[in-house]
Amino acid sequence: MNSSPFDKRNRCFGIILLEPWFLPSPALPGCGCNAGLGAMSYTVWYTMQNIQSKYSLSERLIRTIAAIRSFPHDNVEDLIRRGADINSMHGTLKPLHCACMVADADCVELLLEKGAEVNALDGYNRTALHYAAEKDESCVELLLEYGAVADALDGNLDTPLHWAAFKDNAECARTLLEGGASPDPRDYNQDTPLSWAAMKGNLESVRVLLEFGAQVRVSNLKGQSPVSRLAALLARGLGTEKEEACLDLLGRAVGHLDLRDGEGRLPRELARDPQLCRRLTQMCAAPPSLRALARCAVRSSLGVRHLPPAVRELPLPESVKDYLLLLD
């Protein structure tokens, strides 16, 4: 593991991370045996002061948030009180982004209360919400409460929902959708969050996205759909029961599986597994049932919304409602 220059310096000086007021005072001249200890203490104190002067309060703030214990007695609230800038950029990160990266909801709330810019971009053109969506729904809730844009775009046109789906953080995905995020935003490749979730076989995220009306019949710039991207994952031998369940769920949501792109080609990965290719080809060739097509039509007619409450209000038998919600 590579060590940072700061880590090497810490090992070199040993105890220099002690705050200077915890060190014994330098001995006065003529104090005999204490003179050596005094000289050493003064050297350590001077070294500590020299290092500390190289780090501004704002730099120390972001290191404290990230739990890089350069100064073990620093704390976030005290550094802010002493004048640390909570909106300054250090490297590629800002303090709020860093707090979301480490999923520290208390720190996120403190920074927002003190005036952190909720929609500020970091060095990667990402908002704090992009980081929170990967990690912790409490951080997501706080950011949305303080006005974070739910569909904020980063440099690749990815939204926070894309990242929640990719990391399979279903609760973050649900919180974003409940907070007004669109279920079908497109990234630079025209992939939706459902496509990102499907290509990883992220069953719970797929379930949440379908619950909020995400579209299955969508294609990216390469003609790949969520179903075909999941099929490619299975063809690479990376499928488990979870991925198979994900394929079944997508099939029920769409009414009829179709793996071919706009030019009629199957995913090239299927060539690696002829048995899987035959099975999926047979599934695609089978005609859809009227029930399956009706379910797909009803779900589509309800539009982009949280489907469970909408379906429960329909004047239908409970068994039919469960069928519409993909629960059977």
Image: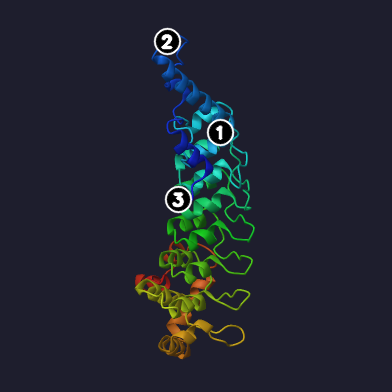
The residue at which mark 3 appears reads as: 136
User: Would residue 143 be found to the left or right of residue 155 on screen?
Assistant: left
Q: Amino acid at mark 2?
A: Cys
Report how far apart the C-alphas of labels 2 and 1 lie in the structure: 49 Å
User: Would residue 17 be found to the left or right of residue 319 on screen?
Assistant: right
Give the colouring mode of the picture: rainbow
Image point (57%, 74%), residue name = 218
> Alpha-carbon neighbours of circle 2 within 10 Å: few (<14), some, or many (≥20)?
few
* Mark 3, secondary structure of its residue: loop
Q: Is residue 245 above or below residue 178?
A: below
The residue at which mark 1 appears reads as: 114
* Mark 2, secondary structure of its residue: loop
Q: Amino acid at mark 3?
A: Asp
Q: Amino acid at mark 1?
A: Lys
Report how far apart the C-alphas of labels 3 and 2 lie in the structure: 57 Å
Q: Nearer the viewer, residue 287 or 40?
A: 40
Image point (51%, 75%), residue name = 229
Q: Earlier in the sequence, mark 2 or mark 1?
A: 2
The image position of residue 74, as x and y in percent, is 48, 31
> Alpha-carbon neighbours of circle 1 within 10 Å: few (<14), some, or many (≥20)?
few
Judge depth for marks 3 and 2 and give the one in front.
2
Q: Earlier in the sequence, mark 3 or mark 1?
A: 1
Q: Earlier in the sequence, mark 3 or mark 2?
A: 2
Q: Is residue 79 above or below residue 170?
A: above
Q: State if disc 1 and disc 3 touch (CB < 8 Å).
A: no
> Alpha-carbon neighbours of circle 3 within 10 Å: few (<14), some, or many (≥20)?
many
Tell me if residue 109 can be seen. Answer: no
The residue at which mark 2 appears reads as: 31
Q: Nearer the viewer, residue 61 or 54?
A: 54
Q: Quadrant of the C terminus?
A: bottom left
The image position of residue 79, as x and y in percent, is 53, 30
